[in-house]
Image (cartoon, grey):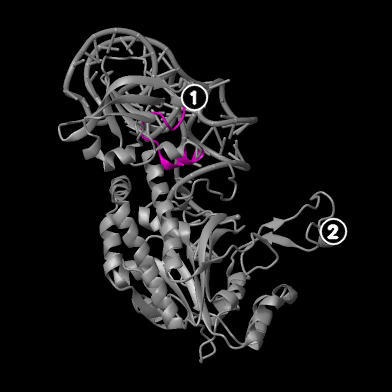
RNA sequence: UCCUCAAUAGCUCAUUUGGUAGAGCAUCUGACUGUUAAUCAGAAGGUAGCUGGUUCGAAUCCAGCUUGAGGAGCCA
């Protein structure tokens, strides 16, 4: 019979294992009375208590142990009476006590400075478990809905959004004259991708429904709690989906993901609720049950201007400031907002125009606290309109780079829609973390790559 | 990138207008066989973010830099 169990397995199979001799391997979280060890092995948020046979002073907090002992129940909790203990090496105490693993409260900034050790904290490992399950379930859900997962290039020469700063990829010597990209590795200017959407649009022509799930890169010098230079995005592209249907789909998709986390990560959510002092579980349940509020851009502008005359001009983007007004003064319900039909001039070239010719079939889903999580649209199918949009919006950009994209429209008027979901923003919302840098293992932001 | 505020022991913070650097926790030593962020007694621990200036004297005032927090802009 098997002897070694991880702690997750022990809690799941405790009825079977009680009064049996088992082996666990894990590290010491707490040590009390020279007698009681609390062990965690990373498989679950829960620790298991180990009771020593004799008092022992020579066990350091943080050390990794192999413990052989008998599992039993005491005061309705399970614990292990140890019979044999093996230490895996030694702890460098000076290093340990100067690190974030010291048995003390550390603020998030301190944790971030030692991001390579954060995984051992209850907080960060909980966030990572939620992050993991979300990725798994995204794949699972989309597979069930007959999507194909495609991998779009990370190094590219197109700039989907047409705005914002991009990271250049080059092997040219910076000190020498930098401008002759013909001599560069790809024979032209190359950059890290900002989105896989255009490639996804080409893929649906042969695969019907596809999604990408990978890192994207923005070189914007934005120092906020909602931005990263490297972040993960899920981008869906669906053939034969009209605007209304894509909105419906995106709402269902988000609700499914929230439901899954409520079901499988409730222990983690309870801990995060305590840590962040936010009633996350109630908030998530509410979002799962209630219909998202759907409102057109025009109406949003009207409503904001009702609060204060001429606060916002038609045609400007709905910034963080106005999002806050919407949640705090207008809707007050902490339910996501779906804002649709944005002005053409503030949205990218590939979005389908409405009949008024000044708005496009685009939508954003805005969440309380974290802002935009989803942005999507029905795509323009007219070759000429895309060409004109691109020329208007990207005056100094080379049309040749997206010629292949334009040519997709030569295969017919195939209507399709898609959206992108900011993965970290979703995790940020679900976990209640204030800073996006705390929901990704190794955050990259201006001035930080360590 | 812009605006405002901040940086003191390993951690969280005190130090009221410039005059010898202080506590709790963590650490170390000792006590404790039902503790659960254990408790009790004692010890040790600091060139006050960095660089420069003003002053008899700077953690404290001034300038620059670095880093962080909040807000703005940009966005997912």
Quadrant of residue A150 within the rendered picture = bottom right
Return the x and y of residue A74 as percentages of the image width and height.
17, 30
Please report the residue visible at 70 percent of the width from the left and 57 percent of the height from the top.
A168
In the picture of the structure, the residue carrying the numbered disc 2 is: A183
Q: Nearer the viewer, residue A132 or A84?
A: A84
In the picture of the structure, the residue carrying the numbered disc 1 is: A95
In the image as oriented, which residue stretches furthest toward the front? A1
Relative to A428, B25 lies left or right:
left
Please report the residue visible at 28 percent of the width from the left and 46 percent of the height from the top.
A274
Q: Is residue A153 magenta?
A: no
Quadrant for the C terminus of chain A in the image: top right
Quadrant for the N terminus of chain A in the image: top left
In the image as oriented, which residue stretches furthest toward the left? A75
B29 in relation to A4, above or below: above
Please report the residue visible at 31 percent of the width from the left and 50 percent of the height from the top.
A269
Relative to A174, A419 lies left or right:
left
Return the x and y of residue A43 as percentages of the image width and height.
38, 41
Q: Say whether marks 2 and 1 touch (CB < 8 Å).
A: no
A335 in relation to B62, above or below: below
A170 in relation to A42, above or below: below
Magenta part of the chain: A98-113
Mark 2 vs mark 1, CA separation in Å:
48 Å
Give the chain letter at badge 2.
Answer: A
Q: Is residue A310 visible?
A: no
Return the x and y of residue A173 as percentages of the image width and height.
81, 50
Say few, some or many: other residues with alpha carbon within 10 Å of mark 2 (under 14 / 14 to 19 / 20 or more): some
Say few, some or many: other residues with alpha carbon within 10 Å of mark 1 (under 14 / 14 to 19 / 20 or more): few
Please report the residue visible at 23 percent of the width from the left and 38 percent of the height from the top.
A16
Q: Nearer the viewer, residue A397 or A88?
A: A88
Q: Nearer the viewer, residue A297 or A171?
A: A171
Q: Main secondary structure of the magenta part?
A: loop
A242 in relation to B22, above or below: below
């Amino acid at each position: 019979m098997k002897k070694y169990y991880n702690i997750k397995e022990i809690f799941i199979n405790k009825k079977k294992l009680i009064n049996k001799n088992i082996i666990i391997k894990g590290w010491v979280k707490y040590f009390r009375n020279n007698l009681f060890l609390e062990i965690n092995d990373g498989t679950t948020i829960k620790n298991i208590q180990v009771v020593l046979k004799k008092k022992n002073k020579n066990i350091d907090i943080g050390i990794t142990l192999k413990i052989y002992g008998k599992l039993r129940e005491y005061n309705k909790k399970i614990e292990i009476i140890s019979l044999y203990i093996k230490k895996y090496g030694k702890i460098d105490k000076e290093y340990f006590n100067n690190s974030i693993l010291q048995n003390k409260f550390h603020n998030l900034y301190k944790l971030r400075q030692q991001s390579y050790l954060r995984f051992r904290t209850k907080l960060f490992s909980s966030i990572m478990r939620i992050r993991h399950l979300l990725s798994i379930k995204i794949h699972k859900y989309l597979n069930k809905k007959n999507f194909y997962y495609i991998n779009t290039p990370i190094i590219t020469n197109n700039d989907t959004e047409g705005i914002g700063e991009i990271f250049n990829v080059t092997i040219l010597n910076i000190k020498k004259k930098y401008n002759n990209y013909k001599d560069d590795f790809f024979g032209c200017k190359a950059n890290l991708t900002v989105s896989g959407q255009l490639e996804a649009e080409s893929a649906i022509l042969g695969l019907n429904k596809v999604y990408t799930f990978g890192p994207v890169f923005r070189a914007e010098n934005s120092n906020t709690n909602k931005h990263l230079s490297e972040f993960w995005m899920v981008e869906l592209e669906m053939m034969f989906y009209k605007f209304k249907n894509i909105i419906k789909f995106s709402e269902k998709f988000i609700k499914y993901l929230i439901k899954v986390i409520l079901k499988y990560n409730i222990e983690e959510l309870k801990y995060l609720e305590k840590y962040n002092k936010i009633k996350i579980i109630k908030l998530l349940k509410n979002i799962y049950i209630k219909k998202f509020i759907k409102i057109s851009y025009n109406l949003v502008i009207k409503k904001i201007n009702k609060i204060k005359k001429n606060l916002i001009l038609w045609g400007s983007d709905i910034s963080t400031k106005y999002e806050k007004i919407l949640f705090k003064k207008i809707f007050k319900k902490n339910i996501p907002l779906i804002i649709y039909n944005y002005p053409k001039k503030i949205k990218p070239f590939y979005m389908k125009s409405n009949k008024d010719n000044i708005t496009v079939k685009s939508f954003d889903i805005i969440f309380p606290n974290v802002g935009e999580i989803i942005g999507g649209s029905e795509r323009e199918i007219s070759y000429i309109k895309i060409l004109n949009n691109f020329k208007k919006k990207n005056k100094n950009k080379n049309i040749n780079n997206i010629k292949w994209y334009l040519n997709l429209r030569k295969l017919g008027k195939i209507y399709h829609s898609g959206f992108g979901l900011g993965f970290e923003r979703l995790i940020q919302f679900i976990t209640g973390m204030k800073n996006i840098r705390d929901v990704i293992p190794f955050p990259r932001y201006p001035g930080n790559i360590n």
